[in-house]
């Protein structure tokens, strides 16, 4: 099945306008490897070609790279697929902690290269600024890895506008991955700057996070608009993101084939101006 495509910033890469986040396939509550691969293949069948992962998508540090290895296995015969990964988080005893030290990022990149089975990572994103390490030092290391040919394009995740601007003085930034959804507009300023610069914006938790995605239909406005389109609330939430900016490529996570098929259906929806106005107000309702 085909899906409308969008540019991934200035990379020259064209991908289906909706991507897939791999995290649910590798953390607590994950499916079997067989079912995980089936979910990835279902995404491909819908025209999804961008897959987001990270070395830290695993249960704990003993299986670091679990999600990267799973996606690499599922996509090994699909050259149209683009795998974007991240480094800078660690999982000691299952906790989420940051490590932006140059020596860690170098090792993380080498480990990701092996896990993905590639000579160069298409898009490598610095996962999260580490308050213990100067941001410029971390980004500078990723830039060095790019110059060494281990990374093709560099992205950032969980950054502010100021951090984006600081990084741009060091390296060409292809993408930014921040949290953004109907209920959380906290990165709207970052999105607007990305749009001005032609940088791809990959909103994570586009359905309000793994634990909340199923329940977003409890919002009266969202549920009513979904019913008027004969669509699911999840599809409406993703369609809103697609209308928000041409640089957006949402990356909903999924652990079941049916869920990613449902998400892909958002690409077919046409929201009216009235729909958009109502949906824009949902975040204000939540924070009021």
Image (tube, grey):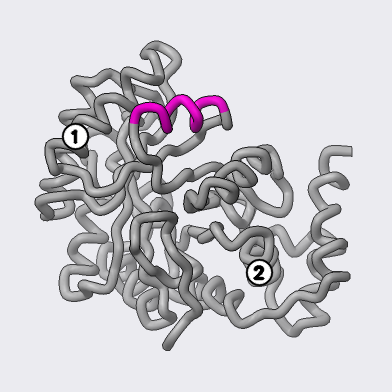
Q: Which of 164 and 65 is in front in this view?
A: 164
Alpha-carbon span between mark 1 and mark 2 = 36 Å
The tag earlier along the polypeptide, 1 or 2, is: 1
Q: What stretch is highlighted in magenta?
A: 162-170
Q: Quadrant of the C terminus?
A: top right
Q: In this view, does 283 lie above or below 7?
A: above
Q: Position of residue 93 (x, y in %)?
A: 32, 27
- Residue 65 appears in the rendering: yes
How many numbered marks appear?
Answer: 2
SS at circle 1: helix
> Taking 232 as reference, is 7 left or right?
left
Foreground residue among 215 and 181: 181
Q: In this view, does 207 lie above or below 45?
A: above
- Looking at the rendering, which quadrant does residue 270 occupy? bottom right
Q: Position of residue 125 (x, y in %)?
A: 35, 41
Give the labeled residue for mark 2.
239
Q: Which residue is located at x 21 percent, y 39 percent?
A: 146
Check disc 1 and report the residue beneath it. 145
State the SS at label 2: helix
Residue 232 to residue 65: above or below:
below
Q: Is residue 93 visible?
A: no
In the displayed structure image, the side of residue 207 where residue 85 appears, left or right? left
Residue at the image point whose x is 35% and y is 28% from the top: 170
Q: Position of residue 250 (x, y in %)?
A: 53, 59
Q: In this view, does 38 lie to the left or right of 203?
A: left
């Amino acid at each position: 099945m085909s899906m409308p495509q969008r540019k991934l910033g200035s990379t020259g890469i064209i991908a289906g306008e909706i991507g897939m986040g791999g995290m649910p396939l590798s953390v607590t509550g994950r499916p079997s490897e067989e079912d995980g691969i089936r979910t990835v293949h279902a995404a491909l069948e819908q025209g999804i070609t961008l897959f987001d992962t990270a070395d830290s998508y695993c249960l704990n540090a003993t299986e670091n790279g679990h999600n990267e290895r799973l996606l690499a296995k599922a996509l090994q015969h699909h050259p149209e697929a683009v795998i974007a990964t991240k480094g800078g988080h660690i999982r000691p005893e299952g906790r989420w902690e940051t490590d932006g030290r140059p020596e860690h990022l170098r090792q993380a990149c080498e480990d990701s290269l092996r896990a993905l089975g590639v000579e160069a990572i298409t898009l490598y994103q610095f996962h999260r600024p580490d308050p213990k390490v100067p941001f410029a030092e971390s980004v500078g290391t990723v830039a060095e890895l790019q110059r060494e040919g281990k990374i093709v394009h560099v992205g950032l995740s969980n950054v502010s506008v100021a951090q984006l601007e600081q990084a741009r003085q060091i390296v060409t930034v292809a993408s930014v991955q921040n949290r953004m959804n109907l209920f959380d507009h906290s990165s709207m300023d970052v999105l607007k700057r990305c749009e001005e610069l032609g940088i791809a914006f990959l909103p994570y938790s586009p359905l309000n996070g793994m634990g909340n995605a199923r329940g977003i239909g409890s919002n009266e406005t969202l549920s009513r608009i979904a019913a008027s389109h004969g669509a699911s609330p999840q599809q409406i939430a993703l369609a809103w993101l697609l209308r928000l900016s041409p640089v957006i490529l949402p990356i909903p996570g999924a652990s079941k084939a049916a869920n990613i098929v449902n998400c892909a259906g958002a690409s077919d929806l046409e929201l009216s101006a009235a729909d958009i106005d109502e949906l824009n107000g949902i975040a204000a309702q939540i924070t009021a």
